[in-house]
Structures are given as structure tokens and as C-alpha cells.
Amino acid sequence: MLNINIICIGKIKEKYWTQAIEEYKKRLSAFCKFQVIELDEEKIKNNPSNSDIEKTLNAEGKRIISKIPKGSYTVAMCIEGKIISSEELSKKIDEIALNSFSTINFIIGGSWGLSDEVKNASQFKLSMSKMTFPHQMARVVLCEQIYRAFEISTNGKYHK
């Protein structure tokens, strides 16, 4: 069975977001072993300098890299990533699995994004949209799109 990880910076505190993620986790259990790995957000002062931001990105990046299993396929969720359709995501997940990867990691950075180290360690860069979303919402939307991708590849009724 395919392993799907969402490795992300920050914890979700609002119950409605955690309930939505738990619902998709339950639905995804029919298709894969799914987990969300939450890592602590780096503390940063108000009005940080570029140097402060760089230090934050690097510290968070090292924690992210430490959680990526060896031999897995990694997708960095970032603004400069490719925008694809739900059908294309489904095909991408199928292709990754057919290329002998047993684990796919989707990486969501903190409020400052992802370090270059994390982006360079990723085999694919994906953008959800040209719009900006709160990280909690992005996490829920990603869970839904992963579920939709499996429904598409199995000709399920969810995707119309």
C-alpha cells in the first residue's frame, strides 16, 4: 500500500480544520497509509529582516528534511510550482507509484515558505493556485485533492 505523508510546519488549533483533515484521513485509509507530520514553527520577531527570514527558513527546512524517508518521492508545495488539474495530480500519483516509490511526501512550509534546501530535495514543485491561502486551509485542500486523485484513478463516484 502506498504511503502518503503531508510534512508541514505548524499545528492546526481550530477544531473545524482538524475535523476536516480527520475526515479525509479516514476516507484515504481505503487507498493508502496517510499521515500528517506537524513540525514546530520557528519563532521569529515582528518585522523580521531578510537574514531573520533566511535563518527561519533554514531551521524549518532542516526539520523537514529530517522527516523525509530515504528513497521516497517528495513534492514541495510552493508558489513557483506547477499548477495542475485534479486529473493531472491523479496521473502524477499513479506515475510515482508505478516508478517503484512506496512513499510520497507533500511538503507545506511555514508562513515564510520553504527553504531552497527543501525545494532542491524535492522531485516536483506543485502550486495550488496563483492565490494565497492560509496554511490551515491549504492543508485541508491538499488532503481533499489527494483523496480526489485516488477517486479519479479508481473511477470512484466522488469526482464528477
Image (cartoon, grey):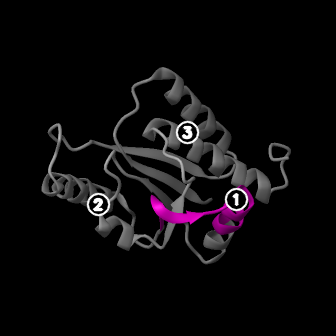
Q: Earlier in the sequence, mark 1 or mark 3?
A: 1
Q: Quick check: is 116 in the magenta stretch?
A: no
Q: Earlier in the sequence, mark 2 or mark 3?
A: 2
- Which residues are the magenta region? 74-93
Element type at marker 2? helix
Q: Is 140 or 153 nearer to us in this picture?
A: 140
Task: Tell me whether circle 1 and circle 2 mark residues in contact (CB < 8 Å).
Answer: no
Residue at mark 2: 66
Any part of residue 76 in sight: no
**Amino acid type, label 2:** Ser
Task: Tell me whether circle 2 and circle 3 mark residues in contact (CB < 8 Å).
Answer: no
Numbered disc in front, either 1 or 2:
1
Q: CA distance from mark 1 to mark 2?
A: 30 Å
Q: CA distance from mark 1 to mark 3?
A: 17 Å
Residue at mark 1: 85
Residue at mark 3: 140
Q: Earlier in the sequence, mark 1 or mark 2?
A: 2
